[in-house]
Image: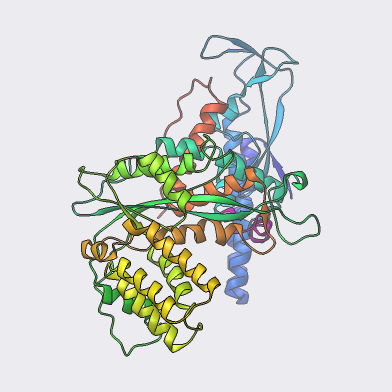
């Protein structure tokens, strides 16, 4: 890649004018010869990148070299000396790599550099990658493997970026996520009649064995040690939604409706959409019950989300989760006696019902389907106790084997443990959600779609960073987060800069 250096302002103006003239000449020749539009477009973009780099070079040339005299006094009163020689640094923009030469200040020639006027004035990042390039890189990083980012951007921008640099960039950005979440605005208050819904679930992230972990964080198929076991990430989701009243029969019909069938009309009312969804994810870095455990992050956050959305104390909280006991235990430890409605995810309960049905009838048979519909309708009508007694009676009548009876006893025990969470008739009449589709979607979008691709495995720091950035992106908070990140980095890097930086203003377009 060609590196452009600072030069005189006049020289830059001439170069810019020359490139603009070349652009105009190119367009004229292309029109005369009738070149294909896509070829013109490609060449134009290439030359516009060159023009952008020259204009950026002109910007730095106009600012000068940051010389503020032999000595400067910082805002807190300390005095620094200008070093005997100017220092160079690289700045990799979306247009290309620029070398900047500027004066720096320290207590002495061999002392740490404490003040760089040009860097402070232009809020340059600590590394050479511009904040805009970091933004673009990480927008791609939350969606695709690091190795593919260069394959996408290099043909477009002509930049060659290493996987290690992109991964380290993710970690650096992710360090600011917790601070951003701590200062973000209170969630929108739920409207009158709206429900506040909370949910949590765990999803495995494929990890590398600590002893074998190389310095990078994500790997695709390659020779080397086999990956370690998965580590569970805990995900939380919060949103509010209008009540959605249905009958047990409508739910049963929706669950067994053929996707391509147009013969049976959909009798369900229009389904309301979740509003102001927020997702958060964490991997455990400590044992259960310790501050670094994921439950100590997610469940207090869910409580804060519910309290922040609540307009009045009577605003219902609905908690929908699967049957994992540790989830409910962790929830109770944080929410305590806070009033709420606890709902066992219907789809998770369905899985146990299917297991029971298949003890009596082979999978895929008409008898199995008929029995499943019968059992599920009883469950949806709130007749769980009658259903469990009926299943036990059927086991006696049909002479199930000892092992089958043991399996059925476990299924019955599961429903009895959650008997206060399966009042589906009451939930449907009140319009409460009875399935955890939002948190299931979060598990898929946050973890599976990005972090469980074929052959991929992670180190703990790399996985934590990606989980945080994925949640920021999926929550629709990326723009706000990047502004926060740049502000925090600027305050950290240039605490002694006395100059006031005006708000950026949009340039008017020429008519």
Location of residue 107 in the rendering, given as x and y in whole percent from the top left corner: 67, 12
| Magenta residue check for 111 | no
Question: Do we see residue 13 in this rendering?
Answer: no
Q: Nearer the viewer, residue 138 or 266?
A: 266
Location of residue 330 in the rendering, given as x and y in whole percent from the top left corner: 44, 44
Q: Residue at x 47, y 80 (%)?
A: 399
Q: Is residue 200 left or right of residue 130?
A: left
| Magenta residue check for 141 | yes
Location of residue 453 in the rendering, given as x and y in whole percent from the top left corner: 63, 62
Q: Nearer the viewer, residue 406 or 55?
A: 406
**Residue 388 image-quadrant placement:** bottom left
Toward the right, the furthest residue is 223
Q: Is residue 123 left or right of residue 414?
A: right
Q: Nearer the viewer, residue 431 or 168?
A: 431
**Up-down: is 285 above or below 113?**
below
Q: Is residue 41 left or right of residue 237?
A: right
Q: Quadrant of the C terminus?
A: bottom left
**Residue 123 image-quadrant placement:** top right
| Residues drawn in magenta | 140-154
Label the magenta part by its dominant secondary structure.
helix
Q: Nearer the viewer, residue 424 or 208?
A: 424
Q: Residue at x 71, y 59 (%)?
A: 220
Location of residue 436 in the rendering, given as x and y in whole percent from the top left corner: 39, 61
């Amino acid at each position: 890649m060609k590196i452009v250096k600072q030069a005189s302002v006049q020289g830059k103006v001439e170069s810019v004018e020359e490139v603009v003239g070349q652009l105009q000449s190119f367009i004229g020749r292309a029109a005369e010869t009738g070149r294909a539009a896509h070829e013109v477009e490609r060449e134009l973009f290439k030359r516009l990148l060159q023009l952008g780099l020259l204009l950026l070079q002109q910007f730095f040339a106009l600012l000068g070299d940051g010389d503020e005299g032999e000595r400067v006094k910082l805002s807190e009163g300390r005095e620094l000396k200008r070093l005997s020689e100017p220092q160079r640094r690289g700045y990799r923009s979306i247009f290309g790599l620029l070398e900047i030469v500027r004066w720096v200040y320290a207590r002495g020639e061999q002392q740490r550099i404490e003040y760089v006027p040009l860097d402070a004035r232009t809020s340059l990042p600590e590394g050479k990658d511009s904040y805009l390039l970091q933004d673009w890189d990480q927008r791609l990083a939350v969606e695709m493997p690091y190795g593919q980012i260069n394959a996408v951007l290099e043909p477009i921008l002509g930049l060659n970026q290493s996987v290690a640099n992109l991964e380290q960039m993710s970690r650096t950005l992710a360090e600011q996520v917790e601070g951003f979440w701590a200062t973000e605005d209170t969630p929108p208050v739920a409207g009158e009649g709206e429900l506040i819904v909370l949910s949590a679930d765990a999803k495995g992230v494929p990890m590398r064995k600590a002893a074998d972990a190389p310095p990078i964080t994500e790997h695709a198929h390659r020779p080397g040690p086999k990956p370690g076991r998965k580590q569970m990430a805990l995900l939380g989701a919060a949103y509010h939604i209008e009540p959605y009243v249905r009958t047990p029969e409508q739910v049963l019909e929706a669950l067994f409706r053929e996707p391509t069938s147009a013969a049976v009309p959909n009798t369900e009312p229009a389904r309301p959409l979740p509003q102001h969804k927020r997702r958060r994810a964490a991997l455990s870095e400590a044992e259960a019950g310790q501050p670094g455990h994921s439950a100590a992050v997610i469940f207090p956050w869910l409580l804060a989300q519910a309290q922040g959305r609540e307009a009045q104390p009577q605003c219902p909280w609905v908690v929908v989760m699967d049957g994992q006991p540790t989830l409910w235990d962790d929830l109770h430890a944080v929410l305590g006696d806070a009033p709420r409605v606890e709902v066992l995810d219907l789809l998770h309960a369905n899985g146990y019902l299917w297991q029971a049905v298949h003890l009596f009838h082979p999978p895929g048979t008409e008898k199995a389907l008929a029995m499943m519909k019968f059992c599920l309708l009883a469950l949806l009508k709130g007749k769980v106790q009658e259903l469990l007694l009926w299943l036990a009676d059927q086991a006696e009548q049909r002479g199930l084997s000892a092992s089958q009876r043991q399996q059925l006893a476990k299924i019955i025990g599961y429903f009895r443990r959650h008997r206060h969470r399966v009042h589906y008739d009451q939930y449907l009449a009140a319009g409460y959600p009875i399935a955890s589709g939002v948190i299931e979607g979060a598990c898929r979008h946050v973890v599976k779609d990005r972090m469980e691709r074929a052959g991929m495995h992670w180190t703990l720091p790399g996985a934590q960073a990606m989980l945080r950035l994925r949640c920021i992106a999926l929550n629709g908070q990326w723009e706000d987060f990047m502004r926060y990140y740049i502000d925090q980095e600027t305050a950290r890097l240039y605490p002694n800069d006395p100059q006031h930086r005006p708000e950026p203003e949009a340039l008017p377009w020429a008519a």
